[in-house]
Amino acid sequence: MKRTVSILTMIFIFFIAVAPTNTYAHTTYESIEGIKATIAGCGTSEDTEKVHSKLVIKNNIIYSIKSNKYIMLKQSSIHDIGDGFVSIQASTKADGNVDKLGLRIHLEIWTDNSWSTVKSWSTDKYDTKNIDFKAVYSVKKGKIYRIRAIHTAYKGTITESDQTITSYITIK
């Protein structure tokens, strides 16, 4: 019996140490420390430190790892596509079908030492497990922008809501 327990313990330790890495949003991280290092290496926005290990930033796209019962993955992004336009994207994936998924997307500009909303969008989808939003919007060159997205899942009487905030970008 003792030998069986120690063999099982060794197998368990082997799988923890050598098991395949976790993959989130098409990026592989060796451990939670790798995720934290990624956040520390990309943190151009003060908001990344508020979420700690539940947030991954890669190429100015915010990926948030599941920390809710129904919201499995949420992400938002903003990219300068030139000529005074930005590409905006946000999505939410639920852990199975939910009654409703909602996205509220806010394009924000940095002025007078604070963020203010320039434009907002809203979209809902019923009896689904994912929702996506894409837009192209005209912005002012030389200004600083970011996206703040509120992701909401409704299942029965439960409402889950969380947000992602992108790193800021300066429009060239």
Image (cartoon, helix red, strand yellow):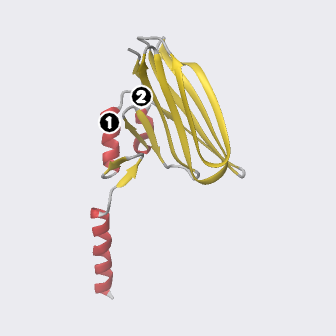
Residue 40 circle label: 1
**Three-letter code, disc 1:** Ala
Residue 159's disc number: none
Read off the residue under disc 2.
167
Residue plotted at (66% across, 38% down): 124
Q: Which mark lies nearer to you, 1 or 2?
A: 2
Q: Nearer the viewer, residue 147 or 11?
A: 147
Residue 41 image-quadrant placement: top left
Name the residue nearer the viewer: 162 or 101: 101
> Few, some or many C-alpha atoms within 10 Å of disc 1 (few <14, some 14-19, many ≥20)?
some
The percent coordinates of residue 46 (x first, y second) are 41, 28
Quarter of the image with the C terminus is: top left
* Res 116 → quadrant: top right
* Residue type indicated by callout 2: Ser
Q: Which percent across, then down, holds residue 122?
A: 64, 31
Residue at the image position 33 percent from the left and 81 percent from the top: 5
Quote the CA–CA distance across marks 1 and 2.
Answer: 12 Å
- Kindly identify the residue that appears in the image at 50 percent across and 17 percent down: 109
Quadrant hosting residue 10: bottom left
Residue 140: percent from left, percent from top: 47, 11
Tell me which numbered mark, 1 or 2, is placed earlier along the sequence: 1
